[in-house]
Image (cartoon, rainbow, N blue to C red):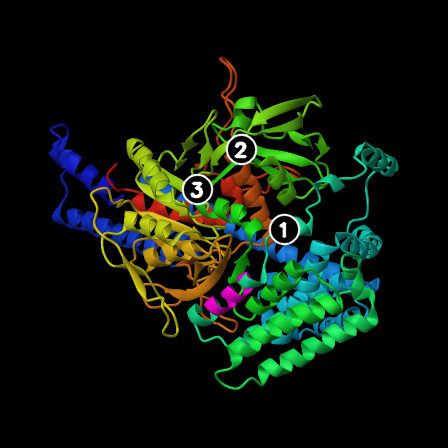
Amino acid sequence: MIRALRRAVLVAAISGIGFSAWMTPRSGIAAENQQVAELQQLETQAVKEARAGHFDRTDEILGQAKSLSHDPTVEQMATWATSFKSQLQIFAAERHKQYDELVGQVKLLLGHDKPDFAMDIASRAFLLSDDKTAFRKEGWVDQLVTKSIGRADKFDQDEEWIRSLRIYSDLAVIEPSVPIWKDRLKLSTRRVRLLAMYTPESLKALQASEVKEREQVEQLLRPTTQPATQPAATQAAKADAPETTDTFKIDWHDTLRGVRMDMLWEALVDADQNYYRGVSYKDLASGGIRGLRALATTKGLEKAFPKLADADRRAEFLSTLEKLDTDNQNAPVGREQETLRLALAKIQSVNRDTVAIPDPVLVSEFADGAFEKLDPFTSMIWPSDLEEFNKTTQGKFSGVGVQIQSDEDGSLRVVSPLEDTPAYKAGIKSGDIITFIDGKSAKGISINTAVRTITGPPNTVVKLTIKSPDGKSKEYAIHRETIHVASVKGYIHRPGGGWDYTVDPQQKIAYIRITNFTADTAAELNTAIETMKVQHVRGIIMDLRYNPGGLLTAATDVVDKFLDHGVIVSTRPDRETNNQPTIAMAKPDADDCTLPLVVLVNQYSASASEIVSGALKDDHRATIVGERTFGKGSVQMLFPLNDRSAYLKLTTSHYYLPNGRCIHREENSKEWGVDPDVTVEMTPDQMRAAIDARQDLDILRDVAPAGGEQPKLNDAVKEAKPKEPAAGVKKDLLSSDPQLSAALLLLRLELTGAPS
């Protein structure tokens, strides 16, 4: 902007044509210089305010600059700022509208005596409230909370675990500082998990008891506007569905195959020696026995373990657990390990003589309870878990290469094939429905079950019956191959494969999204940046939202790409163990990226993504935009057990950012994670809309035939004031995503006027 003004004056001054017309008195030159200085000051202040998240002030300052100059660049900057300000106003209005609608729904349900469902909606309203303390103090909220506490107690007594779980979950949201709700939530969650794993039919029976009431609630909240023929159509749809999908059920015997007591014992010893803080065998014993107590007292499990139905046998088993718990808590110093070992042997013996719970179940549930006393990230990786665990850390698996989702009607829909995979080569496309897998109906099965069934060893065949959107069905016999899942993605998938990284072609601003950190992430990032160099990119938006983390080495390699010196991250335990403190340092490399950088984070950015954003923030290398990150700053190590057929994933230390801040969120933490430089909040509904728009750009489509119309890229650089889309019309990504729009505005303002 300033260069443009100075260049205009200079050109006029040296032009031989009409030179005298450009000659100005000394006072005129002084005035011009003053205007240039004033505009330069306004530009600097506008960028500073934007980086602080003061977008109203940014808009105001650029408006002043625009009034002083008719330079197109100044006008462009002012238009960007005004457009984004309008978008934020729309999103704020949406937030308040959603809040008012939720409060109205709560009061409607209370008026129809539906307090449990009212409590669900109240917890959502709480999260959208501007003043959460004031919200909790409102009379109707206080009455609802008091009533819900009493109902949760009754549901526990009546063994209606799903109902009590929902209420405790809501209470934990509305009263986050009350620890008892988290404890009760954990127990209810454990009971529901037990039913889901061992007797899913019992869980379905509990769920069925709520179906009718839930339908009544839906009718109250959303009175039907469908014609009277709708029920018949629904019945017809159900008639087309298969009668059962039992063939896809996962048997707990398979899940726990190979689980042994010696594995548990090694894990307990490893935890005692290597956990990041002191842990006592007394705590481990207490947690493990609590886990077994829940197993023995959860109604419905007797269908899997028949002797639990015998009241006398169950009472004897529970009595033994109580005594052993007392013995462990009273164990003398130096005898805690021995006392726990004897307790485990006693539990096995009494179990065989009373309720006869299979040993793998006994071991697994004791382990789950014991390690729950530590932290949520310490757990056992049993033999059946190893394959899935390796997929998540290596970014590779053997399958056909499709992303899938479960629709509301239970259909298994293809979101997108992955490029250069068997599914893509076979012609499977986005929107196709997988109706059968190896001849068995896929209707209504879970995503996890579908993934387990479709994946398998390389060079084996899976048969998928595919129904295309035009209603035609075809069976594909597809050979499984090793699939590489890319962790670095661009702005839009190019037809036929590859990514377009450019979000703003005029300003040459690129967008990359890192979905998780795998062994290949750094190499993928290098490839993406090399592509950007060819496109003469001038600034980068790095999206780490919803990134759960991954490999520490991958995270430090990514940071090292943007830093040439200084601390990236350090780790240390809270006590002396065999796990020594570590420190990762950035080093100068010839191919380091020095382009301006904005990083997007939100409350679902965790672990390695917090290391990357935190290090880049502390070094002032990037501006962080979004919401405070998750706070998963604990380091897990794998401890092999026995013959390496199982592992203990144990928290051994915590991550510390360069400024010394611990990333991890403890139970009562007030400070955790990475705070953004620029906070831009989004409601759950707004996040869903942005995810939908993002997913649309991620779809891999075929190359259009000669003369055919190519898929259209979202118009990322329209400057028109954002408008609400018509009902049912999907927004484009930038209209849906104010966090991405904020990042784009920051780079636009920073880059405007810089050399191309």
Q: Residue at x 62, y 71 (%)?
A: 345
To which residue does mark 1 refer? 255
Q: Which stretch appears magenta?
A: 263-270
Residue type beneath disc 3: Ser
Residue type beneath disc 1: Thr
Image x and y of residue 712, in percent:
50, 27
Helix or strand or loop: what does disc 3 sit on? loop
Q: Nearer the viewer, mark 3 or mark 1?
A: 1
Image x and y of residue 452, in percent:
61, 41
Q: Residue at x 67, y 63 (%)?
A: 189
Quarter where residue 134 is shown: bottom right
In this picture, residue 480 sits left or right of residue 4: right
Q: Out of 35 and 673, give the one closest to the viewer.
A: 673
- Mark 2–mark 1 distance (CA, rounded to whole Å): 24 Å
Quarter where residue 321 is shown: bottom right
- Mark linked to residue 487: 3
The answer to which of marks 3 and 1 sits earlier in the sequence is 1
Helix or strand or loop: what does disc 1 sit on? helix
- Mark 3–mark 1 distance (CA, rounded to whole Å): 29 Å
Image x and y of residue 451, in percent:
60, 40
